[in-house]
Image (spheres, grey):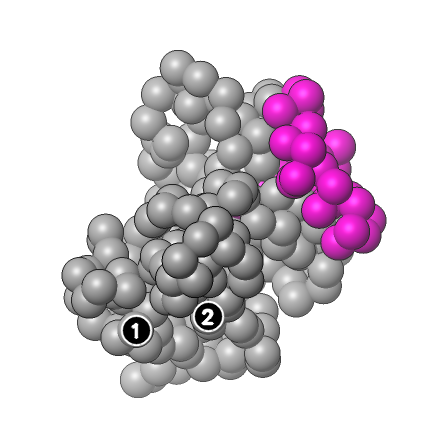
Amino acid sequence: MGNTNRNLRVRSVNGDTDNQTKLKISNLKLIISTEITGYTCQYIYGSHDDLDYESIVVPTYKLNVEKGGKVIASYSVTRDSWYSRGVINDNWGVNDDIELSNRCFEPANGNINLYSTTPTAYPPGAGVDALALRQNNSEKLNAVPHTTRMQTFVNGDPIDEPRADLSIATGVMIHVGGWYSNGSKNKLAGSYGCFGVTPNAQINKTKSGAEKVRTSKSYKDYEISNDAYKKALDYIVKQAGGKNIHVVVEKRNVVEQLRTLKNQ
């Protein structure tokens, strides 16, 4: 096949909102969609005080690999990033209420949602790479704002790695998700606002099915996701042919920012 790269005048390349930028677009794009493909388990970072389970069920979304205007492969990623703020209602017993904050990244403008990427080794020691998103050659991405409440524990202390600017996300990556090996042990992937590529074998068709996996902790019986993830990333890199890999993040219109876990 010949080189079908095109010079386009687009308004959303790298999030450049000031000018229409003439840029040579790679023939390959990763499109993170709003289409739910199933449900999987995700680790909850933050305070684990009185948590019955250190995991939560989240939807997975279709990631299409598009080349020459055609979809050549599809994968699934997590988009939510649940984090425990701690106990918000102490019932003086075992049944406390715990509040979670969703640290996910959503583009500030759904029409300015095309990003360049740079490869990085993440998670450290896992033996796999990741794609870090860039906007105007910066890791600072214009994002749907988080609230001050989302950036603090219940006692008012700042959470680890809070946003310095509530409207700017940093460190956003596409990386390994699901039950994986971090190089020293197998564990369930969590997220601080990234997209976790999750193998189909670790995705349930229904939320109730995923809940059974979560409460039984049978996700520990899964084959670790490292090899499947590495195979997917190697394929994507090969298809890019040495050119930059661009990512489109379709904006979700309704995203739950806070959730209360009752009777923990």
- Quick check: 224 left or right of 165? right
The image shows residue 17, relative to residue 183, as above or below, that is below
Is-magenta flag for residue 211?
yes
Mark 2 or mark 1, earlier in chain: 1
- Quick check: 59 left or right of 173? right
- Magenta part of the chain: 196-223
The image shows residue 52, relative to residue 37, as above or below, that is above
- Quick check: 22 left or right of 71? left
Question: In percent of the image, x 28 and y 64: which residue is there?
Answer: 154
Residue flagged by tag 1: what amino acid is it? Arg
Question: In percent of the image, x 54 and y 58: which residue is there?
Answer: 263
Q: Name the one closer to the observer, 110 or 236.
A: 110
Mark 2: few/some/many CA within 10 Å (<14, 14-19, 20+)? some
Q: What element carries label 2?
A: strand
Residue identifier under label 2: 258
Q: Position of residue 163 (x, y in %)?
A: 24, 64
Q: Name the one closer to the observer, 245 or 34.
A: 34
Q: Is mark 1 on a helix, strand or loop?
A: helix
Residue identifier under label 1: 149
Res. 254 image quadrant: bottom right
Res. 155 image quadrant: bottom left
Q: Are the residues at dot 2 and dot 1 in contact (C-beta closer than 8 Å)? A: yes
Distance (Cα) linking label 2 and label 1: 9 Å
Q: Is residue 19 visible?
A: yes
Q: Where is residue 26 in the image (x, y as percent from the top left)?
A: 51, 53
Direction bottom: furthest residue = 18
The image shows residue 256, relative to residue 97, as above or below, that is below
Residue flagged by tag 2: what amino acid is it? Leu
Q: Position of residue 225 (x, y in %)?
A: 60, 27
Is-magenta flag for residue 147?
no
Direction front: furthest residue = 92
Q: Is residue 71 visible?
A: no
